[in-house]
Image: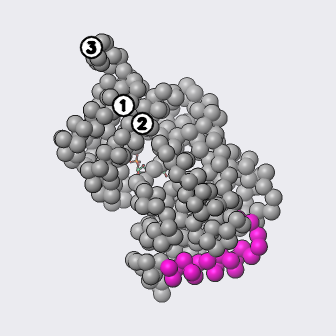
Amino acid sequence: MADKRPDSMKRITGRELADAFINEQVEAIRAQVGDKKVLLALSGGVDSSVVAALLIKAIGDQLVSIHVNHGLLRKGEPEQVIKVFQDEMKANLIYIDATDRFLGLLEGVTEPETKRHIIGEEFIKVFAEEAAKLDGIAFLAQGTIYPDILESEKGIKAHHNVGGLPPELDFELVEPLKYLYKDEVRVVGTALGLPDNMVYRQPFPGPGLGVRCPGAITRDRLEAVRESDAILREEFANAGLAGKVWQYFTVVPDFKSTGIKNGERAFEWPVIIRAVNTKDAMTATIERIPYDLLDRIEQRIVAEVKGVNRVLYDITPKPTGTIEYE
Ligand code: XMP
């Protein structure tokens, strides 16, 4: 039978309860791990970041974190992981820039599911290769949270943190967040000193910007996705929408259209803006972005993003559109 959240466990709603949880977990982690080493795949997402911060507090450099940059992260993300964990928290962090390896394998691949498989499988491969270079690892930490357990129990989806790992990574698990709901993970993350933009960041798919660069990924179109996404996030933050809209991002489709830039013909890509609200990601409604904000975003994108001459706004709810494009 799967783990159950203890009935006696209070909902972690504020700082005091978060501190109590942290103290409890620090003791529990030390008791479980002893003087052994723990390995963690640190993506920079909310759950793995909170696990990292908690384990650093509990066991310091007995935690070895590996951050694999598959080249499909958003602007500034790998830099932030390094700044927060290596520079500020003094984590034992291994940073692997595997951009060339991933983009090489993805070259010319247009089928969305094939792209996803390549990214997922290569990620595990890179992680396993790095882990194999380390000595004395006895545990694997994971950012499993309570909804993951509930969903895999109900057969809704396979628990994304479990399965698919090669046998050489078959370590005993450390899962300190496994009874927490997402809102509680965020409260704990803040109490551990993680920055708001890490703790409250919007959901980001494992295959990253790869699913927002439909068709065969090229470096220049990927760069247009990354730069336009950064502008959108900045403008949403300035407009006070960052914590309000559930998910918002840009997509750069694989076609060009005729336009004019500086009085000359410009045959370039469009950028599609998507902004949606949802409770459970099964259905979604679109965010009605104010037109003055859309205007500002449009002006910045065509001026600042190389190779782009148009901006489109996707008004499709889910269904019929999914949130992502692939
Ligand atoms: P769709 O596109 O299916 O997306 O409407 C629903 C939500 O799931 C996120 N998503 C993913 N998250 N790995 C993830 O961790 C994935 O492969 C993945 N694909 C989609 C998507 O961003 C949205 O929030």
Mark nearer the N terminus (1 vs 3) = 3
Q: Nearer the viewer, mark 3 or mark 2?
A: 3
Q: CA distance from mark 2 to mark 1?
A: 8 Å
Mark 1: which secondary structure? helix
Label 2 sits on a secondary structure element that is helix
Look at the image and say whether residue 34 sits in the magenta stretch: yes
Badges 1 and 3: C-beta atoms under 8 Å apart? no
- Viewer-side residue, 324 vs 275: 275
Residue 262: in magenta span:
no
Q: Position of residue 97 (x, y in %)?
A: 63, 41
> Which residue is disc 1 drawn over?
304
> How dense is the environment of label 1, judged by Cα within 10 Å: few (below 14), some, or many (20 and up)?
some
For the residues labelled 3 and 2, say whether their Cβ atoms are less than 8 Å apart: no
Say above or below: 87 vs 30: above
User: The magenta stretch spans which residues?
Assistant: 19-38
Residue that carries the numbered disc 3 in the rendered image: 263
For the residue carrying disc 2, how many other residues have a C-alpha within 10 Å: few (<14), some (14-19), or many (20+)?
A: some
Assign the magenta stretch its main secondary structure.
helix
* Residue 185 position (above or below residue 159): below
Q: Earlier in the sequence, mark 2 or mark 1?
A: 2
